[in-house]
Amino acid sequence: MSAPSSSHRATNPDPTAAWRAVKGRIAAAEVAAGRAPGAVTLVAVSKQQPWEAIAPVFAAGQRCFGENRVQEASGRWTDLKAATPDLELRLIGPLQSNKAREAVALFDVIETLDREKLAGALADAIQKEGRAPRLYIEVNTGEEPQKAGTLPAEADAFIALARETYGLTVEGLMCIPPAGEPAFPHFALLKAIADRNGLQKLSMGMSADFETAIRFGATLVRVGSAVFGERHGQHAVV
Ligand SMILES: *Cc1c(COP(=O)(O)O)cnc(C)c1O
């Protein structure tokens, strides 16, 4: 499975064992937080990972994967998707409006709706493709200028706009807290915005902090490196 000649070998020698360990930690965090068993879904973030790292985890039964680029995801998953009805692909990276149609055709869930232009492009693409991915609104909880996401103060209005003006069904919220500071205030903020807008699904928590996110109400955790190992070119992209 991992040919010695591959230049893109996973740094994690046993992704399946790491995957099982992460699933065990999620189950333990559910219990510790008084959440129902199975309340939290693991999104295995396969972006920028070599197929040798992903294949064994897929073979072991993982069916929900997160990708941050339409192109990369399309190349990797299109054929498998046709052959695997229960495969769920989630777009967790920024989406350009001009890629909306391609994203709508491929992904089951788009987690990064964050601006009016994209809401319009998605509504249009959904109509043209006859296919409606479930949508999450990304909130820039840290108000970081370089980061995507609607600002917390504008989130309620944006959720209403997406629903009412563009007729989109919003399933939940997503956030990526700023690096290098405690994540829990961001998780708490996202939960508060979700609660007051009647949203049950919260995509929050990554390798370094998914147990904390579960304590604060995450229903989906997006875990990449703790399962697959360090990414190829990890430091070039968020
Ligand atoms: C890369 C990425 C992740 C996974 O990060 P890890 O720290 O490797 O678990 C989760 N969410 C988003 C949006 C990402 O871009």
Image (cartoon, rainbow, N blue to C red):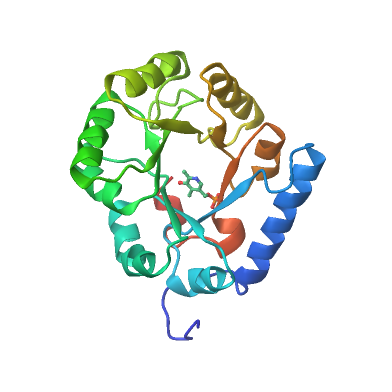
Residue 24 location, x and y as percent? 74, 57
Q: Which quarter of the figure is the C terminus placed in?
A: top left
As drawn, is 19 to the left or to the right of 102?
right
Q: Can the viewer see residue 190? A: yes
Foreground pick, 232 / 154: 154
Residue 116 placement, left or right of 159? left
The residue located at (61%, 29%) in the rendering is 187
Q: Position of residue 102 (x, y in %)?
A: 24, 50
Image position of 150 with respect to 5: above or below: above
Q: Is residue 20 above or below residue 33?
A: below
Question: What percent of the width, then of the height, locates residue 30?
Answer: 74, 43
Which residue lies most toward the bottom here?
4
Identify whether 94 is placed above or below 108: above
Label tally: 0
Could you tell me residue 144's position as x and y percent?
44, 26
| Quarter occupied by residue 195 | top right
Q: Quadrant of residue 181?
A: top right
Residue located at (34% from left, 23% from top): 162
Residue 182 visible in the shown view: no
Q: Residue at x 20, y 35 (%)?
A: 124
* Front-lying residue, 93 or 26: 26
